Amino acid sequence: MGSIMQEVALNEVRFFSPIGYYPEERLLGNEFFVDFSVSFPFENDHADDLNNTLNYEELYGLLCKVMKKDRQLLESAAAEILDEAKSRYPFATKIVVAIRKTTPPFGVDHIHTRVSLTYRQS
Ligand SMILES: Nc1nc2c(c(=O)[nH]1)N=C([C@H](O)[C@@H](O)CO)CN2
């Protein structure tokens, strides 16, 4: 038989957020791109009904709530997104969040930094 898994994802969602270890980064803000996906078993006899799936607009709302907060590290934003998604979607078997900072100020000509967290239901 086999089983079907579903992934609902947002890719490269752009934010301008006050996240950075150094106070001036939080003052000036920076550009971030977030990838976020939630996976769960596809058991859906009415696959054309938005009430029978995970509405990705909700995922966007969650990202907006977390990414507007002042904080020091990408890890802290990623962990809050993951925790909130785990509690909102207990049926999720896998959740991945990755946050990319496009212009980290440490003297490199061109670099993006990226922190990601993955949750797997045990
Ligand atoms: N693992 C991490 N390392 C660093 C972070 C971070 O969020 N996670 N942040 C910084 C500074 O904010 C950086 O962007 C400036 O160089 C440093 N290291």
Image (tube, grey):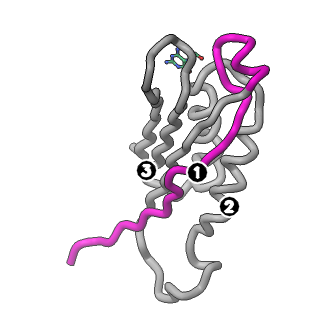
For the residues bearing labels 2 and 3, Cβ distance under 8 angstroms: no
Residue under pointer 1? 13
Labels in figure, total: 3
The residue located at (75%, 24%) in the rendering is: 28
The residue located at (46%, 45%) in the rendering is: 96
Where residue 33 appears, as percent x and y from the top left, is 55, 42
Question: Which label number is shown at residue 115?
Answer: none
Q: Indicate which label's residue lies in the foreground, 2 or 3.
A: 2
Amino acid under label 1? Val
In the picture provided, is 33 more to the left or to the right than 69? left
Picture quadrant of residue 16? top right
Where residue 110 appears, as percent x and y from the top left, is 43, 25
The residue located at (74%, 12%) in the rendering is: 23
Q: Is residue 89 above or below residue 57?
A: above
- Residue span colored magenta: 1-28
Instruction: Return the disc, 3 or 1, that comes first in the chain's sequence.
Output: 1
Q: Is residue 51 above or below residue 23?
A: below
Q: Nearer the viewer, residue 39 or 121?
A: 39
Q: Which element is circle 1 on?
A: strand
Residue under pointer 3? 94
Q: Indicate which label's residue lies in the foreground, 1 or 2.
A: 1
Where residue 109 appears, as percent x and y from the top left, is 44, 20
Amino acid under label 2? Glu
Kindly tell me whether mark 1's CB lies below 8 Å from ligand 1: no
Q: Which element is circle 3 on?
A: strand
